Image (tube, grey):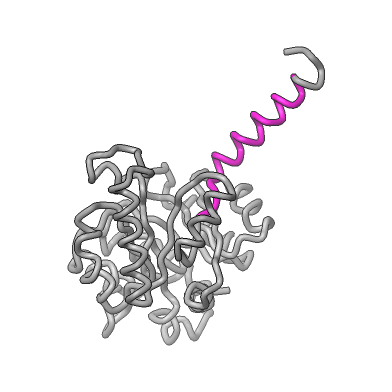
Amino acid sequence: MDGRDLKALWRSGRPSFGAWMTMAEPVVASVLANAGYEWVIVDAEHMPYNPRDLRDLVLLLKGRGVVPIVRVTENSPSLIKQVLDWGAEGVVVPLLHTGEDARRAAQACRYPPDGIRGWNPRDATNLFCEADYRQTFNDRVICMVQVEHIEAVQNLQDIVAVPGVDAVLIGPADLSFSMGHPLQADHPDVQQAIAQTIAGCRAARIPVGIAPGGSVADLVGWVRCGVDFLMIGFDFVWLAAGAEQTLRDMRAATGGR
């Protein structure tokens, strides 16, 4: 599967589920690939990935048939270019506010005449052995922009109208901060802003997703609300939950500590 396949899946009306990766460990990428996830977002915005480790993780995921998408630290053409050169099939661009922000992100993802990206995708092309890369990548690349500020919600119509914006990812946590309700994603005002974003994306036929956390019942609820794709888990959350549950079970079973 590549970016074109994934975008087609997101537009198909069938819900699509991915994973969120924060650990700079190849074995974690392998576990997620072996679990069957078709796409993984690697969070390079908040986590301490060095360039070499990030490149290696992207190439590992890609080699296992998983679509690697990297969340960059900011809306920077140089950062976007690097992770795409290393083999990412797409990027998540955080904290957009306006249509102009979205235009900058979309153009940074693509080669001229559709964008401004410079040419030298050595790793992405397997040392330039993939001859069709130049002809396909502008269509293949995933430019995912984050709506995680109330200004982005207010400017959503301009954002989703930008050519080359392929998907919108809602960030409930930062959105709640921007609305004066820190980490209260269930606050009615925040919920209304999320619902407005989902409705606006669907009206514009732009795939929309969210990374909400919660139980399976909670996640199914988001599918029913109309999202096209979901981050259904985070590597560190899964590790912590599994470790804690096994320890509790053993203590309960043995009556000891």
- Left or right: 59 as drawn, with respect to 111: right
95 left or right of 63 in image? left
Q: Is residue 31 above or below residue 87?
A: above
* Horizontal relation, residue 214 to residue 46: left or right: right
Identified at 28% across, 62% down, the residue is 78
Hey, which residue is sitting farthest front in the picture?
Answer: 188
- Location of residue 12 in the rendering, given as x and y in whole percent from the top left corner: 52, 78
Nearer to us in this view, 222 or 46: 222
Say which residue appears at 62% left-offset and 68% top-offset: 65
Quadrant where the N terminus is found in the figure:
bottom right
How many numbered marks does the figure carry? 0
Camera-nearest residue between 237 and 70: 237
Q: Position of residue 251 (x, y in %)?
A: 74, 19
Query: Quadrant of residue 84 in the image?
Result: bottom left
Name the residue at 34% across, 75% down. Answer: 203
In the displayed structure, 14 sits above or below 243; it is: below
Predominant SS of the magenta segment:
helix
Magenta region: 231-251
Could you say which is closer to the camera, residue 29 or residue 238? 238
Asked where in the image residue 146 lies, by quadrant, the reply is bottom left
Name the residue at the top extreme: 256
Residue 156: percent from left, percent from top: 25, 66
Q: Is residue 194 magenta?
A: no
Q: Position of residue 115 (x, y in %)?
A: 27, 78
Against 256, is 111 above or below? Answer: below
Identify the residue at image location x=72%, y=13%: 257
Q: Is 244 part of what is drawn in magenta? A: yes
Q: Is residue 46 above or below residue 232?
A: above
